[in-house]
Image: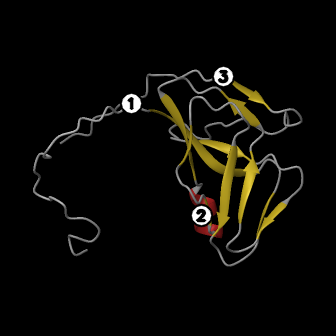
Amino acid sequence: MACMLRTATEIIEVPIQHMPGCEDVPLPAYHSEHAAGMDMHAAVAEPVTLEPGAIALVPCGFAMAIPPGYEAQVRPRSGLAAKHGISIPNAPGTIDADYRGQVMVALVNLGGEPFTITRGMRIAQLIIKPVPRTQWQVVDELPPTERGAGGFGHTGQ
């Protein structure tokens, strides 16, 4: 069976602005042709060292206006996670469409060595995704499935 190729045709325009004093920090950008996420950069005034187990809120030097019906998801960078144990404690983080403040990323050091964050360093990825609104339909009984209420570890794997 042949693989179906799809190309992204929808472009979402998102107003974005540098925070004052952060014009030198790159705005989020794709770094390869088929990258899903845009790299986000640290806008720290001075280097910040994350000790093992520590969490720091790192500014990214920009604010944006996400269109209604969308969210921005902030995700860890795989290289930082694999090489240094740097992740995002609330991954993926969500930025709502009505937020207009500076974008910040909570980073956690899950590694065994201190890690230093410097100005301009790529620290996370940003993805803009559609978010459907949910309307609950209260029912007396849910439709059955083969799985049923089987939860964590129910398959034995």
Q: Secondary structure at mark 3?
A: loop
Instruction: Look at mark 2 in the image and give the residue it sits on.
Output: 81
In the picture, residue 131 is in which quadrant? top left
Mark 1 sits on what residue? 133
Asked whether, in this view, residue 122 is left or right of residue 127, the answer is right
Neighbours of disc 2 within 10 Å: few (<14), some (14-19), many (20+)? some
Classify the position of the C terminus by image quarter. Answer: bottom left
> Where residue 71 sits: x, y (%)?
52, 34
Q: Amino acid at mark 3?
A: Pro
Q: Amino acid at mark 2?
A: Ala
Q: Secondary structure at mark 2?
A: helix
Residue in the image at 17% along x and 42% along y: 1
Quick check: 119 above or below 80? above
Q: Tell me if label 2 and label 3 are in contact, CB under 8 Å.
A: no
Name the residue beneath numbered marker 3. Answer: 15
Measure the alpha-carbon separation of dots 1 and 3: 22 Å
Q: Earlier in the sequence, mark 1 or mark 3?
A: 3
Q: Nearer the viewer, mark 1 or mark 2?
A: 1
Residues tagged 1 and 2 counted as in contact (Cβ below 8 A) = no
Q: Position of residue 4 (x, y in %)?
A: 27, 35
The image quarter in which residue 41 lies: top right
Query: In the displayed structure, does residue 119 sit left or right of residue 34?
Result: right
Residue 153 against residue 92 in the figure, above or below = below
147 to 5, vertically: above or below: below
Distance between the Cα atoms at labels 1 and 2? 32 Å
The total of numbered circles placed on residues is 3
9 and 115: which is toward the camera? 115
| Three-letter code, disc 1 | Arg
